[in-house]
Image: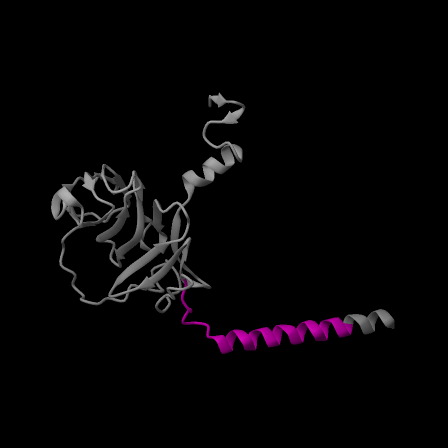
């Protein structure tokens, strides 16, 4: 039972538990949509050198799930992220963290899900006493891992990766259209968080709209005439 303080909900005093639940579940979701192509709900998305780069716009900045990479995801506690860079093969996740408590010491935690099977390590840069530190990450059989951190300062860069060499120096991060994850698309637009699918150009869409409009006009005219008769 939730304690009531001066007739206010302790967890939300504004919109009951619905508001609290929305904050708890807020997440950036990256998908490969059959119509829109690669798209990030709640973030700006771009591709750069075989990686996906997201800049969160969801207001909470704690969680992201890459549905286009087998539901690879991360969730932060004790810190927020300002940018995340994820390798197209899912073997590297780099988070630029922001200290929510100012510029002192803090101990955030990163929970990861659906990591590819491999040996993982975590390295930290730009964080005072924890700068340039490296440690092993224990990946569970279900692909999950919890990474506790001890940081200092207002910002830090945390990289969680396998350290495996990339067989392709600059792979195309767009999923194969035949792998069931989507239709494939070109690079995403950083301003809108989406890209233009290869199967539909602006002129194609305009032409389709003209045809649909013509059918509507013809159908309406026929219907009016039939009612008059």
What is the residue that sits farthest to the front in this orientation? Answer: 103
Depth check: 55 or 126 in front? 126
Placement of 214 over or under 77, stated as above or below: below
- Count of marks, rendered view: 0
Please give the name of the residue rendered at 52% of the width and 26% of the height, measured from the top-left corner. Answer: 8
**85 sits left or right of 218 in the view:** left
Q: Position of residue 94 (x, y in %)?
A: 23, 52
Q: Position of residue 52 (x, y in %)?
A: 30, 59
Residue 33 picture quarter: bottom left
Please give the name of the residue rendered at 40% of the width and 53% of the height, measured from the top-left corner. Answer: 57
Residue 134 picture quarter: top left
Residue 227 visible, this orientation: yes
**218 sits left or right of 64 in the view:** right
Q: Position of residue 29 (x, y in %)?
A: 39, 51
Residue 73 visible, this orientation: no
Coloring scheme used? one colour
Please give the name of the residue rendered at 56% of the width and 74% of the height, measured from the top-left corner. Answer: 208
**105 sits left or right of 222 in the view:** left
Q: Position of residue 116 (x, y in %)?
A: 23, 49
The magenta stretch is: 194-222
Placement of 55 over or under 122, stated as above or below: below
Give the main secondary structure, helix, strand or loop, of the magenta stretch: helix
Specify the quadrant that holds the C terminus: bottom right
Placement of 101 over or under 94, stated as above or below: above
The verdict on residue 221 being magenta is yes
């Amino acid at each position: 039972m939730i304690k009531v303080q001066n007739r206010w909900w302790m967890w939300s005093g504004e919109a009951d538990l619905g508001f609290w639940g929305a904050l708890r579940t807020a997440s950036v979701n990256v998908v490969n949509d059959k119509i829109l192509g690669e798209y990030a709900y709640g973030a700006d998305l771009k591709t750069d050198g075989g990686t996906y780069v997201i800049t969160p716009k969801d207001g909470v900045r704690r969680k992201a799930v890459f549905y286009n990479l087998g539901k690879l995801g991360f969730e932060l506690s004790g810190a927020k992220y300002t940018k995340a860079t994820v390798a197209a093969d899912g073997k590297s996740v780099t988070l630029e963290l922001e200290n929510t408590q100012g510029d002192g010491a803090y101990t955030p935690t990163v929970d990861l899900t659906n990591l590819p099977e491999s040996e993982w390590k975590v390295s930290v840069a730009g964080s005072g006493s924890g700068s340039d530190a490296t440690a092993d990450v224990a990946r569970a059989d279900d692909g999950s891992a919890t990474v506790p951190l001890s940081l200092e300062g207002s910002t830090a860069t945390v990289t969680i990766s396998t350290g495996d060499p990339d067989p392709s120096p600059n792979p195309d991060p767009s999923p194969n259209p035949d792998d069931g994850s989507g239709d494939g698309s070109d690079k995403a637009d950083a301003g809108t968080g989406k890209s233009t699918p290869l199967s539909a150009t602006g002129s194609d869409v305009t032409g389709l709209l003209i045809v649909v409009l013509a059918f509507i006009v013809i159908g309406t005219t026929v219907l009016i005439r039939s009612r008059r008769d």
